[in-house]
Image: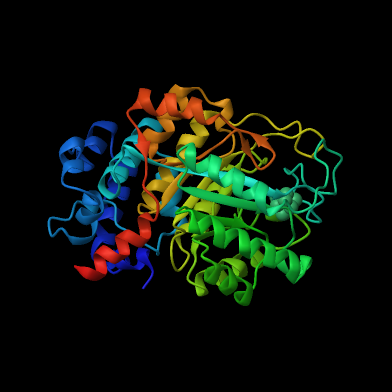
Amino acid sequence: MQPLQVVGRLQARCAPLVRRWLSSAASAPVSERVTASSPVPFPDVEEEENQGPPSYQERSTQSTDFESDRFPVRYDWTRDEIRRLYNHPLLDLVYHGATAHRIYFNPREVQQCTLLSIKTGGCPEDCKYCSQSSSYKTAVKAEKLMGFDDVMESARRAKEGGSTRFCMGAAWRGVSQVGPRQFDRVLQMVSEVRGMGMEVCATLGLLNTEQAKKLKEAGLTAYNHNLDTSKEYYPKVITSRVYEDRLKTLESVREAGISVCCGGIIGLGESHEDRVSLLHTLATLKEHPESVPVNALVANEGTPLEEADTVPVWDLCRMIATARIVMPRSMVRLSAGRLGLSEAEQALCFMAGANSIFTGDKLLTTPNPEFSEDRAMFETLGLKGKQPFYYEKLEEKHVSS
Ligand code: SF4
């Protein structure tokens, strides 16, 4: 059974309560909205920690006094429900995101992942936001697959910097495009990084089930494959593949028993309705992705979106809080665009429900805050890194209880 299925069984019992909250919040005056969603008592974080992990998860999976009744894990969201959530007054929405976050997770813990581009540039896909596409003249030049030792050195540095997940990205259309020799080298990298005690993620483009199974055997924890935007807006951003291709790869990943990391990018010129549509697609998958990256476009010179406006932090918060509420047990990752945010703005995103970040000075080819800057921010905000293998431990705990 997938970890997220554990609480999925509760959805039928819980759904009416959230519907009631949604309808009352949408129609009631502000003063009544507060009553309609009165706060749960704020947990004593230190006390919870002393009881050993994972006390927050236990509360959501085992307690009979079920606080998560108010924010159940559901797979039957309607687009209208998500739209109404998304359109809530922002601070009200952040408050609810923060509440859902505290029910399912220890809010002090933030997962730290490091993303390395192991094969940069020369990609045959035409994603309009990407400096690695061979369709555009950008500063990024095509390179060969990185050497094994260099990748291991990066993984070691990431681990020393506090990362618990190491993600490797290749600018490929998919694994089938490159042939078995390069794929075998990636499998070897996966296996070696896993042997270092880190979670391993890869983003290699389109994947079939057989390839996914090989990655699983090599020790892959998660596969990143973003849907980017809504199904409706997708052809305006990418023409070299279709939305259905992405969904098929996600199915292959699930079939192989690998965690899914899937989210999107805002700031591509899409409407708010497109953002709602993307969240609806993610929240109604058979299983919610274990990781949901929320990226803000970093406009790259030479790409068709080089002149795009900077995404306001408020839009990021709105996406994060809505994602947190509709997929409450997923890690919501504050991803690309973080370098442009102040610590206070990042704090607001953590408050809204983000509990994962990319660390390390590069996100594939995009600049990112340094390890040391993040360490200082964690200290200021009272945050700490999440231990690796969170979902595996949660599943083991459930099975043995
Ligand atoms: S986003 Fe990925 S698939 Fe799209 S062009 Fe860039 S590297 Fe290729």
Observer-nearest residue: 9 or 52? 52
Q: Position of residue 161 (x, y in %)?
A: 49, 36
Depicted 45 relative to depicted 70: above or below: above
Position of 275 with respect to 300 (left or right) is: left
* Residue 257 % position (x, y): 47, 71
Please tell me which residue is depicted at 35% across the width and 68% down the height of the picture. 5
Q: Is residue 271 visible?
A: yes
**Residue 208: image x %, image y %?**
64, 73
Front one among 178 and 307 = 178
Q: How is the image coloured?
A: rainbow
Which residue is situated farthest in the front direction here? 149
Asked if 91 appears above or below 242 in the picture, the reply is above
Tell whether 295 sits left or right of 31.
right
**Position of residue 78 in the picture relative to residue 264 (left or right):** left
Q: Is residue 261 visible?
A: no
Residue sitting at x 70%, y 66%: 183
Q: How many marks?
A: 0
Q: Quadrant of the C terminus?
A: bottom left
